[in-house]
Amino acid sequence: MSHIIVIGAGQAGASLVAKLRNSGFDGDLTLIGAEPVPPYQRPPLSKAYLLGEMELERLFLRPESFYTDQNIALRKGKAVTAIDPAEKTVTVGDEVIRYDQLALTTGSEPRRLPAAIGGDLDGVHVVRTLSDVDAMSSAVTQGARALIVGGGYIGLEAAAVAAKRGVRVTLVEMAERILQRVAAPQTSDYFRALHTAHGVEIREGIGLDHLIGEEGKVTGAVLSDGSEIDLDFVIVGVGITPSTALAEMAGLTIDNGIAVDELGRTSDPAIWAAGDCASFPYAGGRLRLESVPNAIDQAECVAANILGAATPYVPKPWFWSDQYDVKLQIAGLNTGYDRVVTRTGDKGAVSFWYFAGNTLLAVDAMTDPRGYMIGKRLIEAGKSPAPEAIADPGTDLKSLLRA
């Protein structure tokens, strides 16, 4: 195993190469990224970085010297155009590079609005890369008028930052409520009230019909209810899709992302995948997680397995979202819940606990780090306290760990 190539220089790719070196791999190691900068954190892009509270260099996961010091060939601004599994080569521009093992950490891509409804107008932005955020930064200014399309976490985080910078924000969500796909009505209600208190107009059950432009620049929008609003810019937050184009061209199995086994190996024994782009076996089905913790944990597990560890990947799902001065922390997966228990705490802390029958599945904790941490430990330990105990503010949550 003389040369390992990792395609995709995001959180998963950076974690994978670092773990390989840390685990003693001393062969050739190449990390290829399409962006012209070293691997960086994505979550702060649309928050601290856009607000001007974080310098560019602080976004980088590691200084560029790390890759040189670790003898990792970091190829920035290089797009891989083809993989040949039979020859074990990747094509980068005019160069063909051989590999012994290949890992795909290609991440995901934001869904965009169709050109037919104005999605190609200037002033229509997505939030995914450094260049995306740099492109919108000058528009996010005091008094500007913005439309946010999509009421998931991406859209809500963008709305919060825009509102904090004095933008007049309208957010539209086609579903009956914001966060409908990912959270209980209680969580939706909490964040609706939070955004409304900060001046954001949230319009649920209403979608975008089309955008209006003048001289190629967006100037307004017509919504599905026929109403029209004037705009200076648009942020599209309608989800992401796994980046599977290279894997498809290579003939790998695709199933809601690049399908891998419990070790992280694709349908080709010399090719692995991790992070947003990969779906893995879970609870009798397949699961793909879009989160920083999953990108790190799965990439490190794949690195160990490339070196022969044969350790199945067991996810410990957790997520977070920062909106205004509220930190939402989520532990577990709420799929299949039939009951939500509310727990209130001091200084505005509140948490919503998801149950399926008497089984605890997940916790949404708002400005409640204690509730989040204990909920996470309970879920990982397979413990399910009585819902009534959770709801009782007199219950010492820590005592539930000993039960």
Image (cartoon, rainbow, N blue to C red):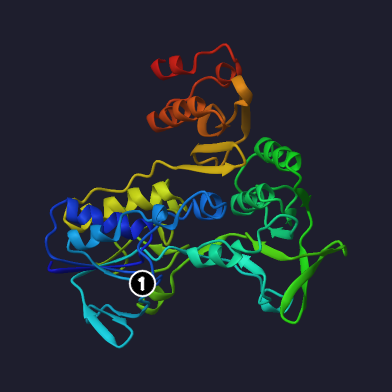
Residue at figure coordinates x 43%, y 70% from the top left: 244
Position of 68 compared to 360: left or right? left
Q: Look at 30% across and 56% down and name the residue there.
A: 63
Residue 263 seen by the camera: no
* Quarter of the view holding residue 66: bottom left
| Residue 361 or residue 51, whichever sits in front | 51
| Residue 150 picture quarter | bottom right
Relative image position of residue 170 (x, y in whole percent): 76, 55
Q: Nearer the viewer, residue 233 or 178?
A: 233
Query: Is 203 situated above or below 27?
Result: above
Question: Is 44 on the left or on the right of 219, as rendered?
Answer: left
Q: Is residue 107 above or below residue 152?
A: below
The one nearer the camera, 243 or 153, is 153
- x then y, percent, for residue 43: 49, 51
SS class, disc 1: loop
Q: Nearer the viewer, residue 210 or 100?
A: 210
Going by the picture, which residue comes out furthest to the top? 394
Q: Can residue 221 be seen here?
A: yes
The residue labelled by disc 1 is 252
Q: Residue at x 18, y 51 (%)?
A: 22
- Residue 199, picture quadrant: top right
As drawn, is 5 to the left or to the right of 330?
left
- The amino acid on which the numbered mark 1 sits, given as a three-letter code, is Leu
Question: x and y percent of residue 13 in the render?
Answer: 33, 60
